[in-house]
Image: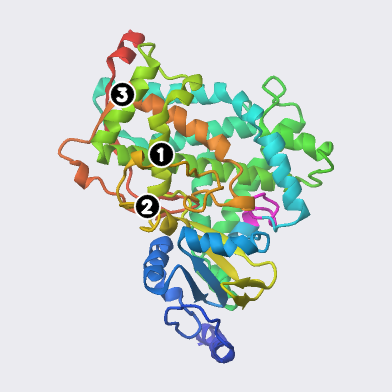
Amino acid sequence: MFPLFVLLLPFPLLFLLAKLRKSRKNLPFPCPRKLPIIGNLHQLSAHPHHSLHKLSLKHGPVMFLQLGSVPTFVISTADALREVLKTNDVTLSNRPSLYAVKRYSYGLLSISFSPYGEYWRQARKVSISVLLSVKRVQSFHRIREEEVANLISDIVKACSSSNPVNMSVELQALSNKIITRVTFGDGIVAQGYGQILEETQRVLGGLWLADYLPWLGWIDALTGLRKKLEKNFKELDEFYNHVIKEHMSGGTQDHDPSDLVHVLLQLHKDPFHGMTFSSMSHVKGIITDMFINGTDTSSATLTWIMTELMRNPRVMAKARDEVRKIAGDKGKVEEHELKDLAYLKLVIKETMRLRTPVPLVFRETSETCVIQGHEVPAKTRVIINARAISLDQNTWENPEEFYPERFVDNNVDFIGQDFSLVPFGLGRRSCPGINFALPVVELALANLLYCFDWELPAGMTKVELDVEEELGIAVHKKNPLVLVPRLFHCVQNDLS
């Protein structure tokens, strides 16, 4: 009887709050029909970017939703995004404070999720000028080339036994190994960290009632979600403590001191242009930013590229022929040759458009602002549906078709400056790690196409190759991509 009483206790308060909210004047924007208390939450599926896209086709490119207690605008076309940000760029530079994100970012100390202000400006400057500068990213070329070579070697072994390869697993492992070495250095044994990271991504991708109905946040504890977060966060934090201790004690002194933890610890002691990370929580928050975002988006993007190439043999053949022409018969593609792979870059760009890795970009108004002539209060959430923008028929011809040639005479890019292609955000809050991730994707893809001819498992056709999604930090292919590699003769000759 007691547990039932506890469960029923909040409901009178909920109905009172719902009545009070109902009495408020609604904002004059298109809005799907709402339900008491939950608002429009019932209209979101496990793939909210698809649900919101469908709603926008009916209710318009700028629509208002009540997601629980959170007033929310959804922007779904490039023209609408351009209009809204034209006068509200700074006002919309904040990110909402979400329960799990706040925990994993050590109290919003990461670059991705810290509030817009002086700390964020200085931390982003450090990221761009120090952590992920062009010079530093180039200095990691040895790590990229070694780990891509290890990937190719593993796949060659599968060729000798004619076994299919789970490319989803292989590409996730590649991303993990590169980012581990870049972030923590060669002297750190990161055994078990991959499993911790996978659990982190699952927890972050979950639906937290605390983010939409704060007074029902206790249900997150009842369902075990909060316990799962705390267990995973403790494992993550203990690993960070181990890494930091090793660096501070000189345990990695025989290795390259340019790894990101080493640099962050230097900034902890010595300010950079007045910026210092005064606590270890600052250091850990930035580490989480680099590591979690870096591994998830790179592996997801590579898996989607290979999926689309297998579904589109014409594009596969064209990209493969370009790579083999540039690399010749020397047995591999080297990083300095990537600049000459024009069609491969179009393939990557088209995948970013059609399989947007981060489909929903969250912002929040920092103060009262005006959207389409109407006043919008502070603390209103704004969701930029990057996937919907990439499928907008007013911007893209045949948007559902995988057609890299659409970018031949189109200078639109995905680095955060064009409104029609925003897979990694836009403007001030665009992802600073794109210049780190892109060389990984390009080098891995070029060598996969150079070294192997790819086939689907026996009995499977390209039509049967699914594109079902699973949402984490990035959108992954839900079912593993399993392919059969056939070794290219130049690679065979090189091995022999």
Q: Is residue 298 magenta?
A: no
Say above or below: 420 vs 365. Answer: above
Quadrant of the snapshot with the C terminus: top left
Query: Hey, which residue is sitting farthest front in the picture?
Result: 409
Say above or below: 116 vs 450. Answer: below
Marker disc for residue 409 = 1
Q: Which residue is mark 2?
A: 396
> Callout 3: helix, strand or loop?
helix
State if disc 2 and disc 1 touch (CB < 8 Å).
Answer: no
Question: In the rendered structure, which segment of residues is drawn in magenta?
Answer: 103-113
Q: Identify the residue shown where x is 63% and y is 41%.
A: 239
**Residue 96 can be seen, yes or no:** no
Say above or below: 184 vs 1. Answer: above
Q: Which residue is mark 3?
A: 321
Q: Position of residue 59 (x, y in %)?
A: 41, 74
Q: Identify the residue shown where x is 45% and y is 67%.
A: 61
Q: Position of residue 405 (x, y in %)?
A: 34, 38
Q: Nearer the viewer, residue 259 or 35?
A: 35
